[in-house]
Amino acid sequence: MEILTTLFHILCAMAPYILLGFLIAGIMHAFVPTALMSRHLSGTGPRAVAKAAALGVPLPLCSCGVLPTAVALRRGGASRAATTSFLVATPQTGVDSIAATWSLLGPAFAVIRPIAALFTAMFGGIAVGKAENRAPTPADTTAGAACPIAAPEDTRPKGFGPRCVAALRYGFIDLVGSIGLWLIAGLIIAALITVYVPADALALLGDNPLLAMVAVLFIAIPMYVCATGSIPIAMSLMLKGLSPGTAFVLLMAGPAANFASFALISREMGRKAAVIYLGAIVVGAMAFGLAIDYLMPADWFSLPAIGHGAHGHSAPGAFAIICAAVLAALLIITLFINYRHKKITSAMTKEYTVTGMNCPHCAAAVRKAIAAVPGVKEVEVDLAGKKAVVDGTAAANDIAAAVRAAGFDIVLP
């Protein structure tokens, strides 16, 4: 019963801020032009890197969601430097997690978190840019000369009303569904730590913040937790005696770094860029963690009273309970929708090998040709892997005919 009570208090504390963040995220998705990012991310200098970091900080994408977005940016003309900056900044924070951070950890954490993401991303992006300028790869030069870069299509609905509907759907259905499992996992882990981990179990780490940060890095880098899901875990660690800087290391490294991200970045941008990406996260997390513990006033990082409510010191208000109920309902609904969608689409998704693609413009042409075939719901084209993944009821022969008409060849599954 104690763990359920703790879980309830944490959920009530976070729910109003998370719902507000989801709403802002939906508005950004529906009203910000889709071509905005690629247009400004083609350079390798500090300006393009800073733009990529600034664009990535407010976006509510976790590390699993940012990977396909970053790959699309890279194949759409973004430089390695800007793509790395975007990859470092985006999963660490977002409008939803900033609001939730304020609710559980206070304003200092909420303000420093996006600042740390911005500076860490710029550090990693500039480092990759310098390495890229020293040794440009043949793939970059030939791809750039082969054919022009196609701008990404704007898939937003037309008109204010339809965009408002799209904003609500993205914020409260798509986004909730994408991070729902990780948010639930973070809440449960936080409740388990709060209830079952003895206060003296972490005393050794609490007395040595540097050792604690290294230990958290070893745990956080291989694991995966989204930016919002990491917040209650960080709060529970602080309640058990770990320093604010150690909690901040978890907030930075947990969402931004994991083995899946490292493997995909190695494949898409090279091992050197992947190593720099991981190094930037580690150095940035340690630097800001140590600065919080040794250079900033300790009272900035005192947990707000709402965080102590998890121990039953204060009961949540009616508004917080209503928001918690709404969030719980959204989580249940979206999990059910995702389960049904996976069951329906698993039998409708097919993968094709497409030959003759040499650049992002070619991939865009293949994508456009397949998307025009009746019965195709979604299509993703992987230029590096020479693959096209098609979701829908379209016949394989119709898809093959469309690809060949566009000037490419295809191998049927």
Image: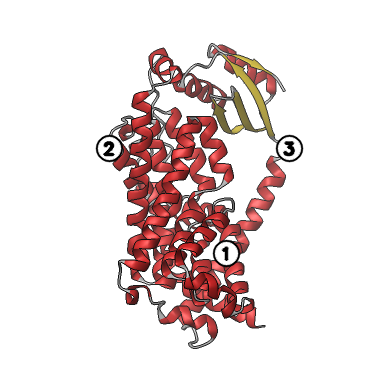
- Residue beneath disc 1: 186
Residue found 46% across the figure and 23% down from its top: 360
Residue found 44% across the figure and 43% down from its top: 87
Q: What's the CA distance linking mark 2 and mark 3?
A: 46 Å
The first of marks 2 and 3 along the sequence is: 2
Percent position of residue 93, x then y: 42, 55
Is the residue under label 1 in contact with that under label 3 (CB below 8 Å)? no
Q: What's the CA distance linking mark 3 and mark 1?
A: 32 Å
Closer to the camera in the image, 306 or 394: 306
Marking on residue 46? 2
Within-10-Å neighbours for mark 3: few <14, some 14–19, many 20+:
few
Residue type (three-letter) at the residue carrying disc 2? Pro
Residue type (three-letter) at the residue carrying disc 1? Gly
- Residue beneath disc 3: 347
Residue found 64% across the figure and 83% down from its top: 2
The first of marks 3 and 1 along the sequence is: 1
The first of marks 1 and 2 along the sequence is: 2
